[in-house]
Image (cartoon, coloured by chain):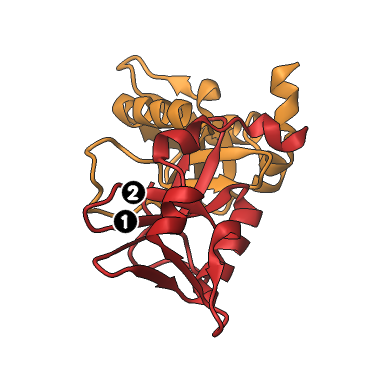
Chain colours: A red, B orange
Amino acid sequence: MRAPASGGATKKPLPDIIAGNGNVYLAIEVKSTSAEHIYINSEKIAGLIEFSAIFGAEPYLGAKFKNKKWRFVHVDDLIRTRGDNYKVDVDLAFSKGLEFDELIKKDKQVKFK
Amino acid sequence: MRAPASGGATKKPLPDIIAGNGNVYLAIEVKSTSAEHIYINSEKIAGLIEFSAIFGAEPYLGAKFKNKKWRFVHVDDLIRTRGDNYKVDVDLAFSKGLEFDELIKKDKQVKFK
C-alpha cells in the first residue's frame, strides 16, 4: 500500500510503500535515478528504520537505475557517506540487493533461528 | 498508516488503515455514526477480507458511536443483513468489539495453536 501523499495526522516520515504477504512485512522507500548513485539523507533513513521497528517490518530501499531492473537493498547494506547520509550505486544494488520476488520469498522464520 | 485518498495504481479497495506492531497486523475500515447502527456494504467487507488475506492482516471494523468510545469488531463478528450487507450496533460493538489497546495486545501465536 502506498503512503498518503499528504494530510497525515503526524509529521513523522512514512515509508513510500508498505507491503506484506503474511510472512514478510516490508517498509520501502523508493528512488529512481538516471545518475550513477542514489543518495538518501540520514533523516529519511532514520525515519524508515523507526517506522519499521514500530510497525514490525524490514526496512528497504527500492533502487531503480536507468535501464536496470528494480533492486531492493536492506538499509543495513547501504553505504554511509562522509556527510552521514546514505548512498547506493549499481554495483551494490546488484550485489546485495534483491529482486522483489526474492524479497517476499524470504522466510521470516530464518530470523528467529 | 492511512491509505492514500486517491491515485492508487489499482482500483481494488484498500482498507482505511493498516496498523502493525511486529506481533499483530490489522487492516481496518473505520466508520462513525450518530445513528444506532453502522451499515457497511458487502463489497467493502469483501475487499477488506481480500486485502487482509493477501497482506497478512486481521480484518476489523473500527466503529465509533456518538458519545461512545471506539470499538474494533472483527469482520467475522459483524451482523449480516437480509440484503447481504453488514451492520454493527452499539450492543455488538461493546460485547464482541475490543478497544484498540486490547486489539494490539492479542498474541498472534494464539491463532496457530
From the top left corner, tell me how far across and down residue B99 is, in percent: 66, 44
Quarter of the C terminus of chain A within the rendering: top right
Q: Is residue A49 above or below residue A20?
A: below
Pointer 1: residues within 10 angstroms few (<14), some, or many (20+)?
A: some
Residue A64: which disc? 1
From the top left corner, tell me how far across and down residue A88 is, in percent: 45, 64
Q: Is residue A75 above or below residue B35?
A: below
- Residue type at mark 1: give it: Lys
Q: Quadrant of residue B96?
A: top right
Query: In the shown orientation, is residue B101 left or right of residue B54?
Result: right
Q: Which comes sooner in the sequence, label 2 or label 1?
A: 1
Residue B11: which disc? none
**Which residue does the numbered mark 2 point to in the structure image?**
A70
Residue at point 68% right, 30% down?
A109
> A107 or A8: nearer the eye?
A107
Mark 2 vs mark 1: tell me if same chain.
yes
Residue at point 33% right, 17% down?
B84
Query: Marks 1 and 2: in contact by CB < 8 Å?
Result: yes
From the top left corner, tell me how far across and down residue A105 is, in percent: 51, 30
> B61 or B33: nearer the eye?
B61
Chain letter of the residue carrying label 2: A
Q: Quadrant of residue A63?
A: bottom left
Q: How far is the residue under mark 2 from the one under mark 1? A: 5 Å
From the top left corner, tell me how far across and down residue A100 is, in percent: 41, 40
Residue at point 34% right, 23% down?
B85
